[in-house]
Image (spheres, rainbow, N blue to C red):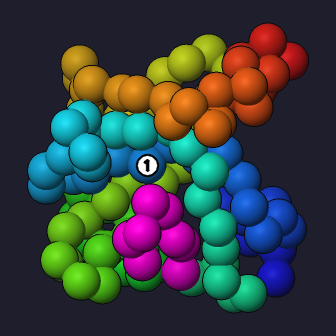
């Protein structure tokens, strides 16, 4: 199923931000995510993130309940949720080439 988030792809480089904590030492990461058929579930670094209606996030971790903001990578580099400033962001090594090609397209 094609949604704004999946763009019809099963796997995509995305910006993932934990609204309530860190993802392996930083608040936001850019990396490969996979989608369920409906696009309502995102899989990232061993986490299962389900579509939700949270106040500051659009997904929640089914195991921890933490809220996550997930969005497409922006060419201009401003990937963080609009309400956040100064978010520490790292690019996953396996996504670096794809990220750089998005930024230079």
**Drawn side of residue 100 relative to residue 74, left or right:** right
Q: Nearer the viewer, residue 40 or 90?
A: 90
| The N terminus: image quadrant | bottom right
Crowding around mark 1 (Cα neighbors within 10 Å: few <14, some 14 to 19, many 20+) is many
Q: Position of residue 50 (x, y in %)?
A: 42, 81
User: Residue 39 falls in which quadrant of the image?
Assistant: bottom right
Q: Position of residue 71 (x, y in %)?
A: 54, 49
Q: Which residues are magenta?
A: 41-48
Q: Position of residue 9 (x, y in %)?
A: 82, 64
Magenta region includes residue 47: yes
Instruction: Please identify the dominant SS of the magenta region.
Output: strand
Residue drawn at (31%, 74%) of the image: 60
Q: Position of residue 78 (x, y in %)?
A: 49, 22
Q: Is residue 15 above or below residue 34?
A: above
Give the total number of marks visible in the rendering: 1
User: Residue 74 falls in which quadrant of the image?
Assistant: top right
Residue drawn at (53%, 80%) of the image: 41
Residue 21 in view, yes or no: yes
**Drawn side of residue 59 relative to residue 101, left or right:** left
Q: Is residue 63 above or below residue 61?
A: below
Q: Residue furthest front?
A: 93
**Drawn side of residue 13 relative to residue 68, left or right:** right
Residue drawn at (27%, 25%) of the image: 88
| The C terminus: image quadrant | top right
Q: Is residue 21 above or below residue 95?
A: below
Q: Is residue 36 above or below residue 100?
A: below
Residue 81 in view, yes or no: no
Q: Secondary structure at mark 1?
A: strand
Q: Nearer the viewer, residue 43 or 3?
A: 43
Magenta region includes residue 98: no
**Drawn side of residue 5 relative to residue 26, left or right:** right
Q: Circle 1 sits on which residue?
A: 16
């Amino acid at each position: 199923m094609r949604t704004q988030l999946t763009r019809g792809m099963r796997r995509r480089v995305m910006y993932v931000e934990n609204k309530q904590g860190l993802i392996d030492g930083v608040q936001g990461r850019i990396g490969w995510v996979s989608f369920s058929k409906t696009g309502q579930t995102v899989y990232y670094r061993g986490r299962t993130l389900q579509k939700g209606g949270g106040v500051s996030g659009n997904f929640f971790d089914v195991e921890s309940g933490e809220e996550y903001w997930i969005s497409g990578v922006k060419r201009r580099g401003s990937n963080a949720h609009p309400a956040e400033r100064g978010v520490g962001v790292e690019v996953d090594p396996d996504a670096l080439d794809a990220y750089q090609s998005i930024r230079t397209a």
